[in-house]
Amino acid sequence: MSRTSLTDRLVALRRDYTGENTGEAAPEVAAALARLTRAQRESLVDVLRSDDAALEGMSVGEPVRRALFPIAETAGQRRLESALLTAATRVVDHLHLRPPATLLRPAHALRAVRPTAAGLVLHLRPDALGPLLVELLPGTGPNGLAGLAGLRYRRRHRSVELILLGDETPGRAVLAGVTGRSWQAGIAFVRRWTAETGRGTRLSGADLADGLGEEERRQRAAAAPDPGGLGSALLRRSGLLSAGLWFTAWEYPASGVAAGDGEQGDWWWEWAGGPEPVDVHRRLRHPILGLPDPVGVLLSGDGRIPTRRRADARPGPTVWLRTVPAPTEQDERRLASFAWPAEFQAWREWDSRIG
């Protein structure tokens, strides 16, 4: 297989996982291949030429996997990305209220996730910025601190850098394509949402010099650490579920999860519509871009399905996969009978600035 053909095949494969377009994925893949040896590139060709049945037990080696699909290297980065994943799933409820309110419209916060050697870049859906800021920006709330403790931001030209304080190396991510106009609309959305709901106020999040406040320190100490980094790994592969109506993800234990349905460090990933769980399971086992060896994947209601490609791999945390029924026209009629919640008004602020 020529270098060009190999690049094209890997770009197409990566796009399935990240949601990137060709122009975003191709430079990352080309740069990674340039750093690999001939033997390493041949191992990739062997995998790409194999059918699904033959992939079981195949491995290209962790250095090759990380070159093509960088991972979150530090505790702070993993913590930030896990929080971004759960915040993105909470955005779903906001997007359902986007006029005209409907459960049948796809409700995804992320258009694409771009893992690079320099860091993580997120591309948002057009209407997701305001709701995402509601879920992320730290501030006061009726039950203490709301939002993500320790999160700060820096405005850049057509982007926003997110910085999570509190670890030896701060976590960082970039929200790409955020213009000054969309940023102001997003902040207006946050202010109207907090005013209408009475759920406290959000801080500006811009001052990096002060470090963590006392309440932020307490919340950070009580937060689940996601030691296995599964939240980060799923965020970077969230394009796998882009064909669904929406997805949700949470780390075990969490409210709504029955006792015994997981262990500390496990994650649940569920979605409505879109791919079948067995197809997502197969993608998460892929030797090149799937989850790392110590991670297991379990289809809810079935027995554990091993995903470790080496017999000597250590046991690790598990991702539980589950689908929920897609909404129907009857659900739509029920939605139309509900009273509008107060936070609906935040979309008026957004529309008055974005249109």
Image (cartoon, helix red, strand yellow):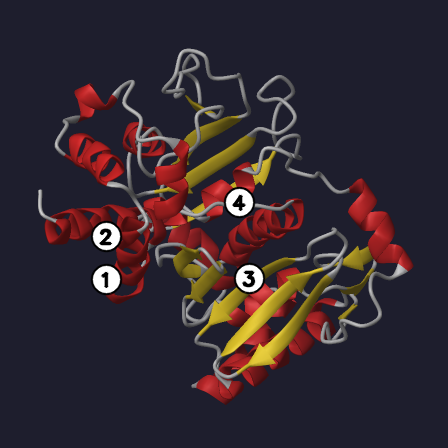
Report whether 196 appears left or right of 93: right
First reached walking from the N terminus: tag 4 or tag 2: 2
Q: Is residue 248 visible?
A: no
Q: Which quadrant would residue 277 be assigned to in this image?
A: top left
Label 4 environment density (alpha carbons within 10 Å; few <14, some 14–19, many ≥20): many
Q: Is residue 167 visible?
A: yes
Q: Which quadrant would residue 147 be assigned to in this image?
A: bottom right
Report whether 218 appears left or right of 147: right
- Give the residue at x 31% y 64%: 24
Up the image or down, 144 lies above or below 267; here it is below
Task: Evaluate if marks 1 and 3 touch, with contact meaning CB atoms under 8 Å apart.
Answer: no
- Give the residue at x 17% y 30%: 46
Residue 212 position in % (x across, y down):
83, 61
The residue singled out by tag 3 in the image is 173
Task: Evaluate if marks 2 and 1 touch, with contact meaning CB atoms under 8 Å apart.
Answer: yes
In this rendered view, identify the residue nearer to me: 198 or 57. Answer: 57
> In the rendered structure, which amino acid carries the disc numbered 2?
Val
First reached walking from the N terminus: tag 1 or tag 3: 1
The residue singled out by tag 2 in the image is 11
Residue 315 position in % (x across, y down):
53, 17
Residue 22's disc is: 1
Up the image or down, 112 lies above or below 255; here it is below
> In the rendered structure, which amino acid carries the disc numbered 4?
Ser
- Give the residue at x 59% y 75%: 346
SS label for mark 4: helix
Mark 3 and mark 2: span between their CA atoms? Answer: 22 Å
Residue 268 position in % (x across, y down):
52, 33
Mark 1 and mark 3: span between their CA atoms? Answer: 21 Å
Residue 25 position in % (x across, y down):
29, 59
